[in-house]
Amino acid sequence: MPVELTFRGIRDSRRALIGWCLGVAAYVAVLAAIFPSIKDMPNFDELIESYPDVLKSFFGISGGASISTGAGFLDIELFSFMLPLFVLVLAIGAGARTFAGEEDAGRLELVLAYPLRRRDAVLAKAAVVGLEVLVLCAAIGLTLVVFDPIVGLELSYGRLVAALAGLAVLGLLHGWLALGVGAAVPSRALAIGVPAGLAAAGYLVNGLHELAGWLDPFRFLSSFWLVGASPLQNGIDAVGALLVLAAGAVALLAGSVLVERRDLQTP
Amino acid sequence: MAEAPAIQTFRLSKTYGGGVRALVDLDLQVERGEVFGYLGPNGAGKSTTIRLFLDLIHPTSGSARILGLDTRADGVEARKRIGYLPGDLRLPDRLTAAEYLASLARLRGDVDTALGHSLCERLDLVLDRPLRHLSKGNRQKVGLVQAFMHRPELVVLDEPTAGLDPLLQTEIRALMRETAEDGRTVFLSSHSLDEVQHTADRVGIIRMGRLVDVDSVEGLRTRSLRRVRVSFAEPVAAEELARIEGIRVQKVEDSVVRLSAPETAMDALVKTVARHPVVDLVSEPADLEEIFLELYRETADAG
């Protein structure tokens, strides 16, 4: 039964995932720990206010954001760049490895010679990618919840859940795109390159569309724009987040249809 | 209705990107209860044929039926009833053989584990070490156990004994024979004539994507090709002998000529030879290797 591929996938990625979670949690913990010293620096907000618009825009420092609040601090330091980066690297790696990577290594040969449909194999593997993304987001959330009372972040837990959900849908889109591309075409390079390129382009468009007018019409294509910036302060755009999730599902389904049509490659 | 044959192909063809014609118009029928040897050199199209059976690749034209099931339309149903050992078996690194086989059994679903266990015991498989630490032989055993453990009606083995010790080769042959005696079917691909002639009932020979010939092993062996050594009293011009239809002069050494000749050419050969003083003439059936090479030459000449 294809669900066995999900179990095996979890088993295979267990160790690496635990490592990821510990590493990212440590990063989050260190940043949370320096918040008290930032909070007590009264001039920091003025310093940031004096940044050129292009920098503020690019780093998701929206109008009214304050680095001296816990939410503002974490939005700028974590949720604007580093956390999406961590989640996307994990998701794209997982999505590309589980199909394109396994095919490259010749290990799909025996799996697909078993009585299961290829699309079910793709979907079973998509569940693993989804689970990895969710576990990493949960680890981030857990770390923040632990540090919240210790360093006085004064987070709204509703906003925190929304922010993590925003991270998760970004991860799901790019991870499932990696899996879908790897299923549709026998190329590990494309399975990594396409979602990584999409993420980079989306991030740039989101950061620069206000400054470069010609980019503005493309902002709807940026997953980062759709989810929204500064989630701990502003929440996320629920419709946008659902659209991003839907796009991920479409990429996945397209891959699971196209995989049936092609030849499995031997290494 | 009569039971469908184990394998039936209809002008099955596969052309890869770049125009490589890996398999051309294969018409083949393998009956239930036989061990069918599929013989050809590396790159002849053996693995391509097998991967078409399993729907791992799709035919460019033509079709194949496994146990009466179309490989494209009813692939899942067909694969339920096939056991497959890939020619280039790649296993996960970290799982042990026991874990991996259990996982494969769950992936297949509905597998009686008793047969798997007895196979592991019979092949003396190391079950509790990570697969990456296993020897080539032990890894191959893992592949064999998973190919046989669900009592498939058709077992497809791609070069199963390549690089294995003779003891294990013998065990694998026994497994194949038992499967056939059980009324089930084995499709054995190999580039080794020796392996096939010990095991198979019938042999199909493939070369450059084309099926050259199908015959029983016995038929192949007895099919006329003779190895002849003629010792003349004095040196003679070998061209005279080479002109006879079907004869291939292999070596001329002073007055001794070695040649291969189909049975049909023997009369003409003897009559030609008789024009000269003869010291000795030895004629014996050629071994399969020579027949095999001869078949290859024929098709090479024809092509």
Image (cartoon, coloured by chain):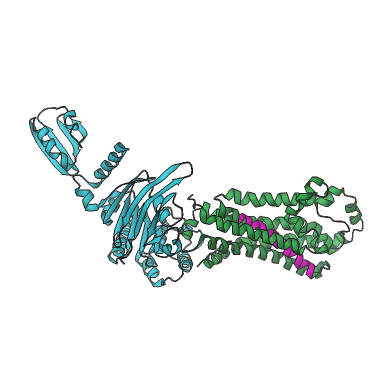
Q: Is residue A36 left or right of residue B162?
A: right
Q: Is residue B36 magenta?
A: no
Q: Nearer the viewer, residue B81 or B231?
A: B81
Please tell me which residue is depicted at 26% across the width and 53% down the height of the picture. Answer: B197
Residue A111 spot, x, y in % from top left = 48, 60
Please tell me which residue is depicted at 43% across the width and 70% down the height of the picture. Answer: B111
Locate residue A68: give its quadrant: bottom right
Dominant SS of magenta comes to helix
Query: In the rendered image, is residue A114 in sight?
Result: no
Give the chain coloured green.
Answer: A
Q: Nearer the viewer, residue A211 or B111?
A: A211
Give the chain coloured cyan.
Answer: B
Locate residue B43: give its quadrant: top left
Q: Is residue B216 left or right of residue A262?
A: left
Image quadrant holding the N terminus of chain B, namely bottom left
- The span picked out in magenta is A157-178
Q: Is residue A159 magenta?
A: yes
Residue B276 spot, x, y in % from top left = 9, 30
Q: Nearer the viewer, residue B141 or B237?
A: B237
